[in-house]
Image (cartoon, rainbow, N blue to C red):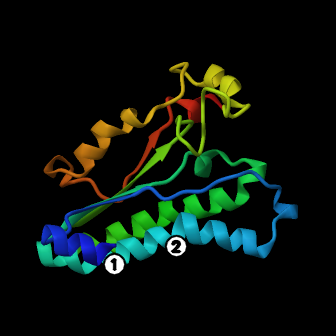
Amino acid sequence: MVATTAEYFGRIDILFNNAAISWGIPAEDMTLDQWNHFIVNNLTSCFLTCRACFPHMVAAGGGKIINVGSIITKLGFGKLVHYAAAKGGMDHMTQSLAQGWGKHNIHVNALLPGLVDTEMMPCKGPKKVPLVDMIVKKTPVGKYGVPEDFYGISVMLASQSSDFITGSIIVMDGGLSLAI
């Protein structure tokens, strides 16, 4: 994927890592295979993509990496131990890559969304997650997020406007983490 992108565009300047799978399962019922499946999909895949983009970004004189984590890393949730561990690993990976790759003019930051209406977390319609209404009531902005809420910050982090921002973990949860 990375080689094809670099060949097509001639360089890689921006990586937006937004890989995730999730479903709840109590830790005591989770198998090692389930645990490994979550870690591979939610953390290892992002690391491998960062690593694959690194030489292309160095060759281009720098780059921007935006990793999408989760507010769950700040809150915890009993049936999402595996998800929280993977996304928490992404937070620390983000900061470590920022520290290690800053000398190459590569800026690495993370966004931590809260409740956002996506295919993985439907907030309306027949597949609506049962906790949506309770979470929305606790959120200071009184609503769930939508993908468009992330456009502005993503463009900013991918642009020269963020040339002095790296290693940041940016909470974008409508204030949910303040309310719990």
Which quarter of the picture shows residue 137?
A: top right
Work out whether 105 lies above or below 173. below
Q: Is residue 121 above or below residue 36?
A: above
Q: Position of residue 130 (x, y in %)?
A: 73, 31
Q: In the image, is 24 to the left or to the right of 101? A: right
* 77 sits to left or right of 122: right
CA–CA distance in space, label 2 to label 1: 12 Å
Q: Residue furthest right?
A: 28
> In the rendered view of the protein, which quadrant contains the C terminus?
top right
Residue 35 figure quarter: bottom right
Q: Amino acid at mark 1?
A: Ala
Q: Amino acid at mark 2?
A: Thr
Q: Which residue is mark 1?
A: 52
Residue closer to the observer: 122 or 64: 122
**Residue under pointer 2:** 44
Mark 1 Cα shell of 10 Å, populated few (<14), some (14-19), many (≥20): some
Q: Nearer the viewer, residue 84 or 1?
A: 1
Q: Position of residue 147 (x, y in %)?
A: 42, 37
Out of 95 and 151, give the one closest to the viewer: 151
